[in-house]
């Protein structure tokens, strides 16, 4: 409990750090203005061509009018089921122009999850690149050659409270939940980002899936500023490599996990026009920040942006300083314009330095969860200290004396792994439905310097030995790759506290090598790969038949392994090779085969007494 004087100081000084920005135009109106003023300027560059502002606007208009003809109205939902591509960007603009809200669905998402999202969102139309789709929902093809053009911009009666998009995040019930973000929420965030993250028309590379709200910044800022959006091909690592070699890029938005990939980046970077690096999605350590600043140079401003999906991408902003930031993690700073942050304990304000739940109010707070009124009422409550709704984030934080905020982790069991927000209950729910498993506990632990998901499984029959490879393969059909446990262990029973709750501290340390028969390396190449696996995974000894992914590896660590292999052997393998050949013995064959193909033998010259 704080005094009235301290309470007033917290409510004023600690929430009065930014000038408010007027939202005079919507994101769509700002894009349309550039399309009118600079119709021939390139706005989207993709692998096989470029699209100009006028062309994109006309194609988006044609799509919008077609959606309207199908009866789409404001607050209706249109699913966009396509990977990153020029058509996808046009699809989003077309949906927004029609008055509807878009629901991004990554095609790589497991079928069961896609079906849940479609059933829950109940879209009127699905936009896709596919010519055929197994669904009763009407769908439209978005192939560039199929998209017509129309000059007239639709004039829909859009309200700021109408929904702009619905993004599905991990849910405690075992099913993902849809966060409904309004037009006003989106325009508020973009008004701030446009003023603070760039000086003028910007150019960037879209790095993340559109079903992850980190993408909103990179997607919209170029479109509303008169800049350019570069769409690079390949996986995340390949897109990152391409971005760091494109001297047109002026800003990038990445997760700390992306930045960790750069620690083994052997080729250097060549982005002389990069002004701003925005980091978000998970905890940003000062060690990673220092290495990143050193790599890019002091002239690049590094923003640490904090914000749950429920508060529209980012509600806190902080600029990293190597001189000022000496703790373990970079601070999350203070609220952006038109946002208010509160540290509460049982709805009472906490004093400076006292940890409590971070609660968020202001123009960025979303409408709530789609089709979940009870959960919405629980998490979005009336603001006892001002107007509107207050979102209870479940994050632990505290005010610092300098008026900035320090993030202290999660209060509940929700965690962030490699930039993705994950409810561990969802993974537990899927595992409990596996045959032969009677109980399960899923926790996030530090393993080898990296936060990993660890699953502890209790078999139905104590005499039974669970097949972890078979279980993990089945999970791949039900969960995205980032939600797969890095470690799975069979134990006899879950340890409990005296009051009957799971005693997570008493769980055994994950041991990926338990029960594995060690087979030592036989060749120099196999020794190089096993050494690299041991260093990256933080376990030893690794045998030549041990699978990288069964030992706790994931896509980002796979990239680090490929970079290390290139550094040690001079051979650059595609990242996909470690997925198809995950053991040292299999990878060594790939390396040796690649090495043999490095040169073509020159035919021996015929024998002569003399040569010219």
Image (spheres, rainbow, N blue to C red):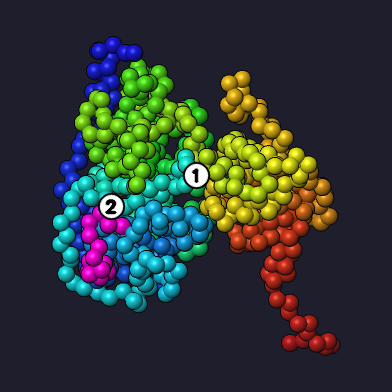
Q: Is residue 361 left or right of residue 487?
A: left
- Going from N to C along the chain, the mark reached first, 2 or 1, is 2
Nearest the camera: 90 or 333? 90
Q: Is residue 236 above or below residue 147?
A: above
**How much space separates mark 2 and mark 1, taking CA atoms?**
25 Å
Residue 75 inside the magenta-drawn segment:
yes
According to the image, label 1 marks what residue?
174
Q: What kind of element bears circle 2?
A: strand
Q: Quadrant of the N terminus?
A: top left
According to the image, label 2 marks what residue?
164
Question: Crowding near pointer 2: few (<14 within 10 Å), some, many (20+)?
Answer: many
Is residue 294 visible from the viewing direction of this image? no
Q: Is residue 62 left or right of residue 306?
A: left
Quadrant in the picture for residue 526: bottom right
Q: Position of residue 237 (x, y in %)?
A: 53, 56
Is residue 397 visible from the viewing direction of this image? yes
């Amino acid at each position: 409990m704080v005094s009235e004087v301290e309470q007033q100081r917290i409510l004023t000084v600690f929430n009065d750090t930014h000038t408010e920005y007027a939202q005079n135009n919507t994101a769509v109106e700002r894009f349309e203005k550039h399309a009118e003023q600079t119709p021939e300027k390139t706005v989207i560059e993709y692998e096989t061509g470029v699209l100009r502002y006028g062309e994109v606007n006309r194609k988006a208009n044609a799509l919008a009018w077609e959606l309207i003809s199908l009866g789409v109205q404001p607050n209706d939902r249109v699913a966009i089921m396509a990977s990153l591509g020029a058509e996808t960007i046009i699809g989003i603009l077309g949906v927004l122009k029609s008055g509807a809200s878009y629901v991004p669905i990554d095609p790589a998402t497991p079928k069961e999850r896609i079906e849940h999202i479609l059933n829950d969102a109940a879209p009127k139309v699905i936009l896709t690149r596919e010519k055929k789709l197994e669904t009763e929902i009407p769908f439209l093809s978005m192939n560039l050659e199929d998209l017509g053009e129309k000059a007239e911009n639709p004039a829909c009666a859009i309200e700021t409270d109408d929904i702009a998009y619905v993004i599905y995040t991990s849910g405690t019930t075992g099913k993902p939940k849809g966060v409904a973000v309004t037009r006003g929420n989106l325009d508020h965030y973009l008004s701030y980002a446009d003023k603070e993250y760039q000086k003028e028309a910007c150019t960037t590379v879209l790095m993340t899936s559109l079903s992850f709200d980190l993408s909103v910044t990179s997607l919209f800022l170029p479109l509303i500023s008169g800049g350019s959006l570069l769409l690079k091909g390949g996986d995340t690592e390949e897109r990152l490599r391409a971005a760091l070699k494109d001297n047109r890029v002026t800003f990038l938005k990445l997760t700390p996990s992306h930045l960790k990939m750069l620690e083994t980046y052997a080729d250097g970077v060549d982005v002389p026009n990069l002004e701003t690096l925005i980091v978000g999605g998970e905890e940003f350590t000062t060690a990673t920040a220092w290495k990143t600043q050193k790599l890019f140079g002091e002239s690049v401003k590094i923003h640490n942006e904090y914000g749950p999906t429920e508060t529209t991408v980012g509600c806190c902003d902080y600029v990293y300083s190597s001189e000022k930031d000496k703790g373990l993690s970079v601070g999350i700073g203070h609220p952006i314009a038109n946002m208010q942050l509160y540290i509460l304990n049982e709805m009472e304000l906490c004093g400076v330095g006292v940890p409590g739940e971070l609660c968020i109010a202001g123009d960025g707070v979303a409408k709530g969860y789609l089709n979940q009124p009870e959960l919405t009422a629980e998490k979005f409550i009336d603001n006892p200290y001002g107007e509107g709704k207050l979102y209870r984030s479940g994050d632990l934080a505290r005010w610092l004396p300098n008026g900035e905020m320090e993030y202290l982790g999660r209060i509940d069991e929700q965690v962030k792994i490699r930039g993705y927000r994950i409810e561990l209950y969802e993974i537990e729910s899927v595992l409990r439905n596996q045959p032969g498993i009677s109980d399960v506990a899923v926790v996030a632990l530090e393993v080898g310097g990296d936060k990993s998901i660890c699953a502890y499984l209790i078999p139905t029959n104590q005499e039974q030995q669970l097949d972890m490879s078979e279980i993990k393969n089945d999970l791949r059909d039900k969960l995205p790759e980032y939600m797969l446990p890095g470690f799975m262990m069979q134990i006899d029973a879950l340890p409990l506290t005296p009051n009957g709750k799971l005693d997570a501290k008493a769980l055994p340390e994950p041991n990926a090598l338990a029960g594995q028969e060690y087979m030592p390396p036989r060749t120099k190449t196999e020794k190089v790969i096993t050494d690299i696996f041991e260093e990256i995974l933080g376990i030893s000894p690794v045998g030549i038949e041990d699978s990288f992914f069964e030992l706790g590896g994931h896509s980002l660590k796979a990239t680090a392994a490929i970079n290390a292999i290139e550094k040690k052997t001079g051979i650059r393998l595609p990242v996909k090779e470690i997925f198809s050949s995950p053991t040292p013995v299999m990878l060594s064959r790939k390396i040796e085969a690649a090495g043999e193909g490095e040169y073509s033998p020159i035919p021996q010259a015929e024998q002569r007494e003399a040569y010219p």
